[in-house]
Amino acid sequence: MLYRSLVNRISLAAALFGAATAAIGDEKYTQAQDMAYGVALYDYFQGNYFDALSTLMVAGQRGSIRVHADNAELIEGGISLGFGMQQRAADLFTRQLEKADGDPESLARYRHVAWLKLAELTYRQQNWSLSTEYLQNSGAAAETPLAVNLALRGGDIATAQQRLENLDKDRVSASRRVLAQINIAAALARAQRYGEAVRYYQLASALAVASDASSEIEILRDRTHIGAGYAFALQQRYAQALEEFRRVRLHTAWADRALLGMSWAAINSGEYQTAVDALQFLRDRNSNTPAAREALVALPFSYEKLQRPKAALVAYQQAEQQYRASLSELQQLVRDVSALQFVPTQDTDIQRYGWLQLAETPSLLRDNRRYLHHILESDAFQLRLSELRDLQQLAQVIDRWQQRLPLFDQLIADRKQRRRNIVDGYNSAQYDQQVEIAQQQYRALESALTRIQDKRDFLALLRASGGTDAKTLARIEDAEARYRKLAPRGMARDTQATSLERARGILLWRASEQYHENLWQQRKTLSGLDKQIQLATARQRKVEQIAQRAPQLQQLQNKVESATPRLAKQRDAIADATATIEASIRRDVLAALNRERSQIQQYMAHSRLAIARLQDSALQAAPAAPVLETGNDDA
């Protein structure tokens, strides 16, 4: 079916995510316990699959998801599968299955869906034997037509028929069962077992009729009638073939094949007028489809069988003109395709969230779909276009990083300069010397305070404590010094000495009373000074640490410098991969065009030979009075 593999990738990712998130309700947590896991869930439900995958992969590298590690791996596997990272998805699923073997009760709910998705994954990788093994491990052979397809891939039609009978009708939709029957019928037809093929086509048709009407069921029913019609025709049972072809709806994409099969069945059964009607309708409906191009030569052949040579000659001539025009178009198209750039050329950024969507086919190919119908609908072509688009998006990411690297280099240089300024300021202020001086002062003060405490020197403590009493003591000591100078000269009185002794005694008494308080205050001041010195020492160490981090900045700068050639190498690798894929697409498109051209050339050669034959017959019949045709030769 059209683009089936891409659609399956998205549905498989959703199925795996559903299996993983179903387990969340069984846990004791009602909300995400890991920040990265919660962010990934949010991005997923917002449709930002690329961001969700990036978050999970980064979290896996950092080990930042612990509580929901199992769920995170299953979700990452589902999204990876959606992005086409099949090996990564397989590794994650296999890891979970190994855990499930060790703890079947807690993780058994994942086994069924994980094995089944691995089976479907390896089937798309065309690894039939491994897909069969995974399907057996899942125990879901009765729940999916994959078992039927695997048997057909192995050429065992009998096993495929048995597996079809064993499908659980309650768990396998009618459309999937109809498709499985069609696949078996096609395999029987390829084995030239046309009678059995017809029976399976008819079974599929009956099931489609009995099912609820839907666009998918209607399309499948048309395919059953077309397949049965060709199977009847190959058995030369043309009446039954005509009946099957007549059941195909005319407004569908399958109508051309049905009309062409109907016309050849009518021709072979001698119903030439029926063939003419079908071929005329097909030609007038769309003259540029492959079936219509074949109808251009089948129609005059039918006229000849109806003994209408003039109408046949005109139809052959019209066919020749049509073929000549088609060959001219194909020649120009080949030149255009040879110079076509399949890589997206839009200036705007490619939406990264659109990686799960189909790539847009170049307009040149869309406009000439009549010659490229089969290749444009093939999964291989669409996947390669998607790969080109994804490579272009990666190229844009690398281009942006290449533009940012000089900015990072400048930021690192600025940070180095700022660090250098800090270190220079520290060195210029001689910070370490100031800290050393403060430490010396602290030690001297502590030593003096210890001596005071040992000698209980009240006045020394009073002098160290400062304040009013310390100033009074200083004045008394100054007065005593002056008295000692004046007394020997007879310039002092005895009352002055008495007053000085009284003042000192009073001050000493007050100092003794305040001794413990003054001592506590001095110890408190000393402790504060110690804390300041410790703080200054800590700041000094911090500055030294900042200075020691300079090599890390150099390492970061080295990484930035090494990223430049690495990004350039990756950019070249993307360019090479892009060129390779583009060349393969161009080669396949040109091969398809050449096949069309070869087929049209054969049609045109046949038309020219028929024209020459009819004209020669007309010339030979000229001496004798030719019988003029009447009426219906203007078809």
Image (spheres, helix red, strand yellow):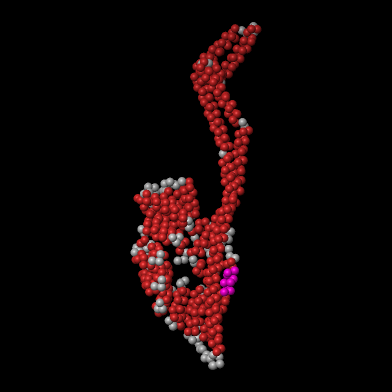
State the extent of the magenta-drawn residues as a range: 327-335
Q: Nearer the viewer, residue 425 or 529?
A: 425
Identity of the residue drawn at 51% across and 73% down: 289
Q: Magenta span has 328?
A: yes
The image shows residue 451 at horizontal and vertical percentages of 53, 18
Q: Is residue 205 visible?
A: no
Asked if residue 336 is positioned above or below residue 505 in the image, the reply reads below
Identity of the residue drawn at 55% across and 76% down: 601
Asked if residue 480 is positioned above or below residue 517 in the image, the reply reads above
**Which of the image's four quarters has the N terminus?**
bottom left
The image shows residue 313 at horizontal and vertical percentages of 53, 84
The image shows residue 250 at horizontal and vertical percentages of 45, 74
Identity of the residue drawn at 54% across and 15% down: 507
Q: Nearer the viewer, residue 274 or 375?
A: 375
Identity of the residue drawn at 57% across and 49% down: 563
Residue that lies at the very extreme toward the right in this rendered image: 489
Asked if residue 304 is positioned above or below residue 84 in the image, the reply reads below
Q: Magenta span has 94?
A: no
The prevailing secondary structure element of the residues shown in magenta is: helix
The image shows residue 189 at horizontal and vertical percentages of 41, 72
Q: Nearer the viewer, residue 410 or 602?
A: 602
Q: Is residue 473 visible?
A: yes
